[in-house]
Image (cartoon, helix red, strand yellow):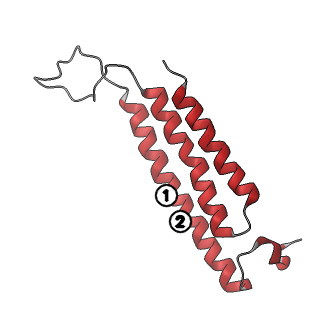
Amino acid sequence: MTLFPYLVAGWILLAGIYGVVRSRHLVHTVVCVSIAQSSTYVLLLAIGYQRHATAPIFGPANPPDSPVVDPVVQAMTLTDIVVSATVTALLLALVILVAKRHGTVVPDRLHALRG
């Protein structure tokens, strides 16, 4: 087990959070949220990685007693990618609605949304 993928996942998460905090544009914020969420891909793949293991496809080249990676973690990663794409599309649709209604996507100029 190596620590490097976990550090990469943490660095990507921090970069995304830093982008959200420093953002001055709603589209930039959505992109940074997507970057922060992409750290979970690296984390899930790091959890499921096994040294010298292959894909869980058995055949003459890969007998059933050979080491394989966990397919559940790979399925969770694919599900995470689909959820991330859906969340990004939803947030971008909300940004379009805000732009149509208020004429700007700069958070500092959206005074009408403040309570």
Which residue occupies 41% across, 45% down?
78
Above or below, 4 against 19 in this view is above
Disc 2 on helix, strand or loop?
helix
Disc 1 on helix, strand or loop?
helix
- Amino acid under disc 1: Ala
- Residue 111 position by quadrant: bottom right
- Residue 69 position by quadrant: top left
Above or below, 60 against 19 in this view is above
Q: Position of residue 108 (x, y in %)?
A: 82, 72
Above or below, 53 against 55 in this view is above
Which residue occupies 72% across, 62% down?
23
Contact between marks 1 and 2 (CB within 8 A): the answer is yes
100 sits to left or right of 50: right
Q: Which residue is mark 2?
A: 89
Judged from this view, the residue extending furthest toward the right is 115
59 sits to left or right of 74: left
Q: Position of residue 40 (x, y in %)?
A: 55, 40
Looking at the image, which is closer to me, 109 or 56? 109
Q: Position of residue 89 (x, y in %)?
A: 53, 65
Looking at the image, which is closer to me, 34 or 18? 18
Crowding around mark 1 (Cα neighbors within 10 Å: few <14, some 14 to 19, many 20+) is few
Crowding around mark 2 (Cα neighbors within 10 Å: few <14, some 14 to 19, many 20+) is few
- Amino acid under disc 2: Ala
Q: Which residue is mark 1?
A: 85
55 sits to left or right of 40: left
Looking at the rendered image, the quarter that the C terminus falls into is bottom right
Q: Which mark is residue 63?
A: none
Which residue occupies 59% across, 43% down?
12
Looking at the image, which is closer to me, 30 or 23? 23
Which residue occupies 75% across, 58% down?
22
Marks 1 and 2, how far apart in space? 6 Å
